Image (cartoon, grey):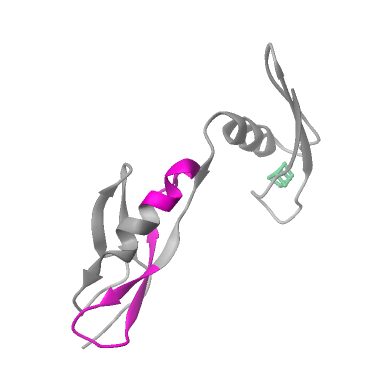
Amino acid sequence: MKKQLICIICPRGCTLTAESGNGIKVSGNACPKGEKYAIDELTNPLRTVTSTVRVKNMPLTMVSVKTKDPIPKDKMAEAMKIIRATEVNAPIKIGDVIIKDVFGTDIIATKEINL
Ligand code: SF4
């Protein structure tokens, strides 16, 4: 099987070709990061999820959040459900853990909310 993909690791955006058969052979990459990216995409694609969480004690206020580490791509919808069902109280600092252990990582705040 042959698959083409664009490397998103840096702005150069190399067009990669990954051929699977006896292992995975990658071409089109200008550096080794592209090879790793293509192999990860074919074997275990990961994504960082970004979203917002409602601030319970401040009406109409949301705090932006993200997964501390990337999670499996096929778990993104489930992670979004967990995030949407969550409310948090201010004050909140950048890096505060908003939800613990969502598919092996934490959901952390990316914005400061003061009372
Ligand atoms: S292969 Fe290397 S140079 Fe090309 S986009 Fe990926 S990281 Fe950038």
Q: Quarter-wise, where is residue 93 in the image?
A: bottom left
Q: Is residue 57 left or right of residue 24?
A: left
Q: Is residue 57 above or below residue 92?
A: below
Image quarter where the C terminus lies is bottom left
> Residue sitting at 28 percent across and 64 percent down?
85
Q: Position of residue 3 (x, y in %)?
A: 75, 32
Quarter of the image for residue 56 reads bottom left
Q: Position of residue 20 (x, y in %)?
A: 70, 20
Is residue 68 something that shows in the picture? no
For this orientation, the residue located farthest to the top is 22
Q: Quadrant of ligand 1?
A: top right
Q: Nearer the viewer, residue 74 or 102?
A: 74
Image mark count: 0
In this rendering, the answer to whether 37 lies above or below 50 is: above
Q: Residue at x 76, y 53 (%)?
A: 12
Give the extent of the magenta segment.
Answer: 52-78
Confirm whether the magenta stretch covers residue 53: yes
The reply to whether residue 14 is in sight is yes
Q: Position of residue 45 (x, y in %)?
A: 54, 38
Q: Is residue 33 left or right of residue 102?
A: right
In which quadrant of the rendered image does the N terminus lie? Answer: top right
Residue 80, magenta (yes or no)? no
